[in-house]
Amino acid sequence: MRSNKLAVAAASLAMAAIGLGGATSSSAPTRFGQIDDARLAKADSEPQNWLAYGGNHLGHRYSALDQINVGNVANLKPAWVFEYDTNRGQETTPIVVDGVAYVTSAWSKVYALNAKTGEQIWAYDPKVPGEAGIKPCCDVINRGAAVYKGRVYSATIDGRLMALDARTGKLVWSTMTVDPAGQTSITGAPRVANGLVFIGNAGGDTGGRGYAGAYSAETGKMVWRFWLTPGKPGVKDNAPSDEIMDKLVQPTWFGPYNEYRGGANVWGSITYDPEFDQVYLATGDGYPWSRWYRSAGQGDNLFIASVVALDAKTGKYRWHYQETPGESWDLDAVADMILADLTIGGKVRKVLMHTPKAGLFYELDRKTGEVISGVPFVPGVNWNLGLDPKTGRPIMNPAVYYDNKTPVRVSPGGAGAHSWHPTSFNPNTGLFYLQARQGPPGLTQPQPTYKYVAGLTNLGIFVFGQTIPAEITAAAPPQVANPTPARSYLMAWNPVTQQPVWKTDGNGGGVLATAGNLVFQGSSRNVMGTLNAFRADTGQKVWSYDTPNSIITGPVSYMVDGEQYVIVPMGAALSAMGGGNDVRMRAPGRLVAFKLNGRATLPPDPAPAGPPKPPPASQAWSAGDVSEGGQLYAAICARCHGAGTRSNNVVPDLTRSAFLQNKDAWKTVVDDGALTATGMISWAKYMEPGGSEKIRGYVADQARKALVAPPPPPARGVDTGPGPQL
């Protein structure tokens, strides 16, 4: 591999010569956020910085720095640690500009840090109201900011898009982008280009139509909004999407209109393409998930689970490709998109690469939207039978659609073959790196009836341990013979041959590729984790470092004063589908920077949380109340506190809560909303009087059972298997 050391050194000298070197020898940044379109367009020429969410407009998540390489990565150690003021999930991507790291944290807070020392320069708290914390599906996380022309752009859980002064952190403007009375939130990172800030929103688990928009970077005024699912027939949105809604989208939806149906939210990936001046939106599930209740069991339901290309200036529709027509299994398409020029069949193609949860590695022509290829990157995919050779549309397997009483088995399952976690493309190796997951088909069990309740998880299928009627359970198809074995791995994929090059077992998160022939990836074991480095060409693990926090998002790399750093946010997300057995005390999230021969020390692992704390035996509930409490818990509590009360304690483990001991204290929290500021609103309106006490009875019963037969804790760390393999 060609060395980039001379190129990096030359770039650093050039930056210093024009006064943009950032941190001086005294470690004091001198310029703040001075990124313009010219710098963004040539981000690859500044490997000492990380100017955009994906490193550049193309989203490669690749660093041309190679001071840290396979020969010396064993000497990589912590350089500094920054501790957040919250223990909630951390999924930000840092932006590093001229010696300053701009990062976000849970509850949509924004920080500017000295990238050499980790010292805080400023912090901004948008003071998100606690009641907004229940709107996103998966904790009050934030995936990052954008920096442009002296400002830092960030969005909030309650739907605001903000511009902050990059030097001081003072608010310049704030624009509400959602209906505050609705169930929509924002967890994604804005993107910027040509004076516009692009942002989408989340809500595919809570109801409402998805959309994305562009706002003036100078004033915050909305320039355009593109709706992604149809509204009331005959009613215009007065938006760039109106024409295509009538012509193409509305005919793919069936059944009666209602205000909550829709989805296709852009809660993750947005990519700007400077070559065609267009923006790509990756969209999520339809709402409800069940097409039976969403669209009378019919139709492709555009633009759910799609990639949609729009004119960046006007928001006018250019093309789309639907990756999972009629999606009904939580196989949304929100994964990061990566742009590249690839030689395919002897011809250079302008390609968009995408690895959605549905398990196909899609390559689309960026100009036309033509599907170049779509092949499974994991085995066992059964929802489609290939792509139509004429239209490129996935040939759907009719056996995977379900009505309101017939369960189905679908692969990949709801966890997906790959979720939102950042992917990477190394232009030197020509390989695409991602975390992949395979397994036997997952069971989707539909609800026989449906009622929308704003604020609750109403998906049209049974989730979170909800009680399933016997007739639905009895109708479940048997597992297929010799199913695909469960396996999770980091994978290098050749996008030209559409074949895997290597797979290394392990349960990791987002990735970063570097010119040092390395791929960095964090992993998780409950709330703790490990940062790992692998050879980019072979997948051999060459370094690891245990951390007191789990690592979910991808690292980034930069250079200050001639030293290369790898920086990674740390902090567990809530475990809504069941926490680990090794429950730990709640600990703050952190941002940790590593460099060669760093001298910082990480805090110890959080201490065990101790055993569950059920109330005294004198407090008893009838079997009927406990059973009813379990149903209420599944409907109201499980998505945050864990199915079956199995929690990793990011959101408090209720079996260990002090409030569990006292009926009045429990009621004060659950019914009266005493902890609303922390996101724990009053839930009284969602149940009959006395319901919260029945929930307490169920949690107490679960706590007592756990004391009688506690499960063994898992081993510390993550077993990455025997090494690279296919």
Image: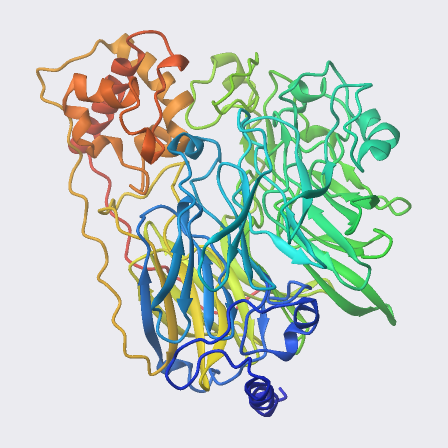
Which residue does the image show at 48% across and 13% down from the upper left? 469
Vertical position of residue 514 compared to residue 656: above or below: below
In the displayed orientation, state which residue is furthest to the right: 390
Residue 23: where, in percent of width, then height? 45, 79
Q: Nearer the viewer, residue 304 or 669?
A: 669
The image shows residue 354 at horizontal and vertical percentages of 68, 54
Q: How is the image coloured?
A: rainbow
Image position of 329 (left or right of 363): left
Q: Is residue 496 visible?
A: no
Residue 449 position, x and y percent, is 57, 11
- Quadrant of residue 111 in the image? bottom left
* 421 lies above or below 44: above
Between 664 and 572, the one lying in front of the other is: 664
Task: Give the side of residue 100 with respect to residue 372, left or right.
Answer: left
Q: Of residues 604 and 121, which is closer to you in this image? A: 121
How many circles with numbers are drawn on the protein? 0
Q: Position of residue 205 (x, y in %)?
A: 55, 30
Residue 3 in sight from this viewpoint: yes
**Left or right of 534: which side holds 353?**
right
In the displayed structure, would residue 548 be above or below residue 263? Answer: below
Image quarter hosting the C terminus: bottom right
Q: Is residue 225 left or right of residue 487?
A: right
For the N terminus, the image quarter is: bottom right
In this rendered view, identify the residue nearer to me: 516 or 49.
49
